[in-house]
Amino acid sequence: MSTSENGAESDRPMLVSVVIPVFNGLPDLGEQLEGLAEQNYSGPFEVIISDNGSTDGLRAYLDRHPLTDRLRLRHIDSSARPGGPYARNAGTAAAAGDFIAYTDQDDRVHAGWLSALVRAAADHDAVGGPIETETLNSSEVAAWRPTPEPEQRFTTQYLPFAHGNNIGMWRKTFDKLGGYDETMLGGGDDVDISWRIQQAGLTLGHAPEAMVAYRLRTTLRATWRQAVGYGRTSTEVYVKHRPLGCRRLPLSMTWLALLIVLRHNPLIPLTRTRIPTGLWVLHAGVLVGRIRASVRHRTFYV
């Protein structure tokens, strides 16, 4: 297999392995498998279900699934350690492909997802794609999570990143990095591995046509828990990468977050509530998660 000037593979992969970490993912996993069966990718690929300790009958469900042969579907046990990062690492270890694509149990890849990732990977060591929230969510819930345009990358105050449910990389990239950081539970592992790719001098591309439909939390309580987790893990990623050059959030972003939380609080009658309640919950939860984690880690990342 040849290599491009920037060090990325320039040929198509011999085999693509799609790795899906799963924990009690039924029935949503069925929709993801249907999306994978509709891929227009012309090359061979397999699907690895990395079972992180499911108790919902996942193994029996897969044993009788009608797409097993078509998807070259394989189940592997990754219950030795909880968490998506461990499940991704275990799934990758069991995969036979020279290019690994990652997505999640409760989303749905668009038909051109794999083709677009592989095309972009010809010039990069790893590649991510966009997400959309209209397909799998009601219009009300979709308004809770604005997403960038497909051509736009996911950005941070430090380096861009690929969303955890939409990233692919050559196996040699994965091996060079040593895989996902298994200590990062509840999120943040996608930002961490994206940053490590770039810190290692490797390229992280973006494929606008590699679209994934993203399923959101449908209740305010679940959205709050997820948002607090986002705030916590973003702080943990900052603490890990601070010695490597990661900067704190600009104060302007902190003031903006505080302004949104205070001005649009739906619980206070006199405040303005021009943004959806779910979006306010997201902003407030992230801020609370950052404050809690900042206290725990004795840093300032709010």
Image (cartoon, helix red, strand yellow):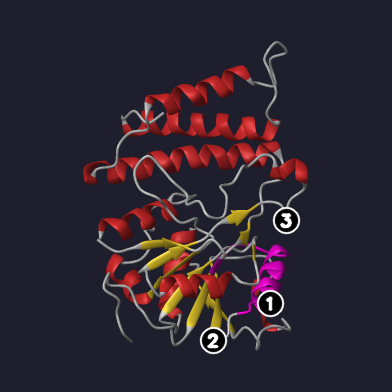
Find residue 148 and report its horizontal and vertical position in percent.
Answer: 56, 47
> Visible in this render: residue 82?
no
Identify the mark at residue 43; answer none if there is no mark.
2
177 over 13 or under it: above or below: above
Labelled disc at residue 38: 1
Q: Is residue 169 left or right of residue 150?
A: left
Find numbered disc 2 in the image and state the secondary structure of the residue it sits on.
loop
For this view, does 8 lie left or right of residue 217?
left
Residue that numbered label 3 is attached to: 136
Tag 2: amino acid: Gly
The mark that comes first in sequence, 1 or 3, is 1
| Front-lying residue, 207 or 24 | 207
Q: Which is closer to the viewer, label 3 or label 2?
A: 2
Name the quadrant containing residue 92. Answer: bottom left
Residue type at numbered disc 3: Leu
> What secondary structure is found at the residue carrying circle 3?
loop
Alpha carbon separation for disc pair 1 and 2: 13 Å
Secondary structure beneath label 1: loop
Considering depth in this image, is 10 or 217 the residue closer to the camera? 10
Q: Quadrant of the C terminus?
A: top left
* Residue type indicated by callout 1: Glu
Which residue is rendered at x = 39% and y = 38% of the image?
235
**Which numbered disc, 3 or 2, marks the residue that appears first in the sequence?**
2
